[in-house]
Structures are given as C-alpha cells and as structure tokens.
Amino acid sequence: MVFSARRSVSAVLRGAVLSLAVAALVACGSVGGLYGAIPGDNRPHAKVDRARGMPIQGIDVARYQENVDFARARGAGIHFVFMKATEGKDYIDPNFRVNWERARDAGMPRGAYHFMTWCSTAAEQAAWFVQNVPADPSALPPVLDLEWNNHSSCKVKPSKADALEKINVMLTAMERHTGKLPIIYTDMNFHRDILEDVYLPNTFWLRSTAAEPHERYKNRPWTFWQYTQTGVVPGVKGEVDRNVFYGSTGDWLMFLSTGCDPRAMATLQASGRCQFAK
C-alpha cells in the first residue's frame, strides 16, 4: 500500500511538471504552430513565412515605440514606415511630428495613418486629420485605419450603410488634402462585417498574423500585409508590427512614383489618379 501510494504521488508530480512545461512552451510560442524567436520576430508563425522572404519590408509605429532610429532601421533593410498621426476628432499621437521629420531626414518613405472612431462624425475627423498631417508630396499615400473600437470607451457599431458613408467622407477628404488615393488598413472582423464584397478603388493593407491574407479575406487583393505584431527591428525599441509590400523592387519604385498599386494603374489613371511624381 505504501509503495502504491508513493507511485501515485510520483505520477501526479510528473503530470504537474509536464503540464507546466507545456504551458511554458505555449507562452514561448513553441507549440500550436508557432516557432521560437527568430531574427526579426519574437513569436513568428509558420503560416506567414512567405512574408519574411519578400523583398520590400516595412514597419508601422506609434508612441509605444518611442524614439525610433529610422536611419538604423533603414540600414537593416526596412523600406518604409507607416506612423500613427491622428485618431477620432481630437487626438494626435505625441510622437507623430518627430517621427514624421526623423523618417524624412533618414530617407525612409513614410506615410501617416488616421484611426477612425465611431463616436464622432467623419467631418470632424477629416478636419482634424487635415489640420495635423502635412500634405507632403514626397510622402506615401495616407492610411485610413478601419477597425472596431473594442479597446476604447467608444463601443458604437454603426450599420454597414452608416459605416460606409463615414468611410467615404473620410477617404474623400484625405485624398483631397494629400492628392493621393488613400490606403485602407483593416482587420478580419471589420472587413467581414463592413467591407467584404464592397468595391473600393483604394489599395488595401491587411492584417493577418497566422495565415496568408487570401485565406482570411476572401481573396481581397492586397498591396500591404501586416504579418506580425512581435517584430524586432534594429533602431526600434521593443516589439513592432512588421509589414511587407506585395511585389518586386520595380513594383515598389512604381508605387513610390505614383502612389498606386501598379496592378491597378490602367483603371485608376483613367480617373485622373496615379500621376507620376515630378
């Protein structure tokens, strides 16, 4: 009886140790389809490996990355940066202006994004964006970030018709201000609820950190892909979102010159857009 009881206790202890080991592996990203850290990513997912080998890599930053050394990031192979500028009708990222200037001085192509909220009007948000974001001809097209505001005090979820009306007001104002067709950034939930099966001429930037975008967005054409939120880049403090441009170096140079995806040039040029930079 004593021997049997000791075996039982030992088995329980071994089981507890094994459970803790599995939990640790999960936390470190070593099971469930995730790898351990690799250069450039603390918790890479196997299903986005293709992104890591694509030639035109980028990042997006906000105040959380603090003092970004854009020259160092550029030297490490980062080709572009999108940075948070404004949110709603009255918030500006405290690091936006310094990020905007430092990226320009480092020769890093950069674009500004506005985070859309659903508790203020599109007209108010457009006016705030125009007031705070320079209309710089050398910048990348502006970005409209479209998500549900789950992590803010604004819990409003407009109908599809109301959301699309606000989106169109904002896109029109951003294009008028910058002279460039805005990029739409979105995630799977918002795309499913509002944007799925809706045609918009804009370039899409899609978030998909555990699969390729076509698997999550019903084959929505994409130009930019946000493939991890645990990226590691020289010159950037802590973790950072990493992104990739869809095409080759030649495609990228065309995008820089026109602000448009080369695959859509024929259609968009007919509407007077995508003029080559002088």
Image (spheres, rainbow, N blue to C red):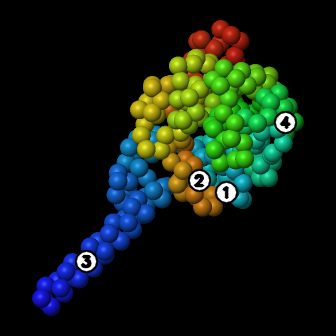
Relative to 16, is 28 on the left or the right?
Answer: right
Could you tell me if the residues under marks 3 and 1 are in contact, i.e. CB atoms within 8 Å? no
Neighbourhood count class around disc 1 (C-alpha, 10 Å): few under 14, some 14–19, many 20 upward: some
In-front residue for pair 182/200: 200
Quickly name the residue at label 4.
128
Bin the neighbour count of mark 2 within 10 Å (Cα to Cα): few under 14, some 14-19, many 20 and up: many
Tag 3 residue: 12
Per the image, label 4 sits on a secondary structure element best described as: helix
Residue behind mark 1:
65
Q: Residue at the front extreme?
A: 1
Viewer-proximal residue among 61 and 40? 61
Q: Earlier in the sequence, mark 1 or mark 4?
A: 1
Q: Amino acid at mark 3?
A: Val
118 and 104: which is toward the camera? 118
Q: Residue at x 63, y 37 (%)?
A: 147
Q: Residue at horizontal 77%, vertical 49%?
A: 93
Q: Which residue is mark 2?
A: 240
Q: Is residue 277 visible?
A: no
Q: Are marks 2 and 3 in contact (CB under 8 Å)?
A: no
The amino acid pointed to by label 2 is Val
Q: CA distance from mark 2 to mark 1?
A: 7 Å
Distance from the alpha carbon under mark 1 to that under mark 4? 23 Å
Up-down: is 195 above or below 271?
Answer: below
For marks 4 and 3 on the same chain, the one whose residue lies earlier in the sequence: 3
